[in-house]
Amino acid sequence: MPDFALGLAALGRPAYINLGREGALPADRDVDAMRAQCHAVLDAAYEAGVRRVDAARSYGRAEEFLAGWLVERGHRDVRVSSKWGYAYVADWRRDADVHEVKEHSLDRFTRQWKETRDLLGAHVGLYKVHSLTPDSPLFGDVDLLVALGGLRDSGVRLGFSTSGPRQADTVRRALDIQVEGRRLFDSVQSTWNVLETSAGEALAAAGDAGAEVFVKEGMANGRLAVDPPARVRELAERHGVGPDAVALAAVRAQPWVDVVLSGAASVDQLHANLRAGDVELDPDELADLAEPADRYWATRASLAWG
């Protein structure tokens, strides 16, 4: 069965687009309060057997919080992945007009990899391009691709995450990239949930080709927990779990999934998410809930940061 991983998007900064965070986070989201919250959720995840953590340079201070936790606890068996490409620009303001800015350039990669390495060192075994799309300049930037190949050759595995209605195109194109005769990326992290299934075939093909497949946003940024479809609610009642667990169980049911991300913002949310391991679903049990990809991503884009 797939592994669970804890994603730190909701824990490294005071604002994010996930629904259902308001009551889960401290009333005062200053740096110290968010660090304590992040460490508490990391402790709960470790105690529950979760040994994977996913961060990004744009998740506010997530890498810093994680690095401090690893030093304080002394854990050596936690597998860390992080991402480059977005920069956090909100200056810890929840009401900022812009929270993160994307740039897939050699300069951004070089600078952010140094920042990640300085904080997390050898803990980072997988480094991903953040939110790759078919129009990314990365695909035609020879110098950037060569630099990425150098990092790969140093022993750090490379991957990419995807977003948008053309995720499937991105997955296929990115996995075809070769540097010095070898495939550049061996891991992909994509959005898949019962409302957005458009990347499924491409992710299955990626898995068949030997790539490790992470699934993010399995709860549709909280939509499936806060306002679940009737069918999800019925299954949750039948299994005695929350709708979040059913949503993540649907992800775990896909035979091509290796890692399922939980974006829990609190210990209670984490424990509720992990109940997905108690729910067995058929891979196509909720297939009729899927929305057109363009509509799904338009809805996601309309979610407010808070």
Image (tube, rainbow, N blue to C red):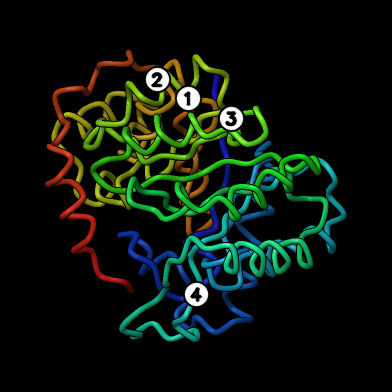
* Residue lying at 83% horizontally and 49% vertically, measured from the top left: 75
Residue wearing tag 3: 3
Whichever of labels 3 and 2 marks the residue nearer the N terminus, that label is: 3
Taking the image as shown, residue 262 lies to the left or right of residue 83, namely left
The nearer-to-camera label among 3 and 4 is: 4
The nearer-to-camera label among 1 and 3 is: 1
Label 1 near label 2: C-beta < 8 Å? yes
Residue wearing tag 2: 254
Q: Quadrant of the C terminus?
A: bottom left
Residue wearing tag 4: 88
* Amino acid at pointer 1: Val
* Amino acid at pointer 3: Asp
Whichever of labels 1 and 4 marks the residue nearer the N terminus, that label is: 4
Q: Few, some or many C-alpha atoms within 10 Å of disc 3 (few <14, some 14-19, many ≥20)? A: some
The relative height of residue 143 versus residue 260 in the rendered view (above or below) is below
Label 4 near label 1: C-beta < 8 Å? no
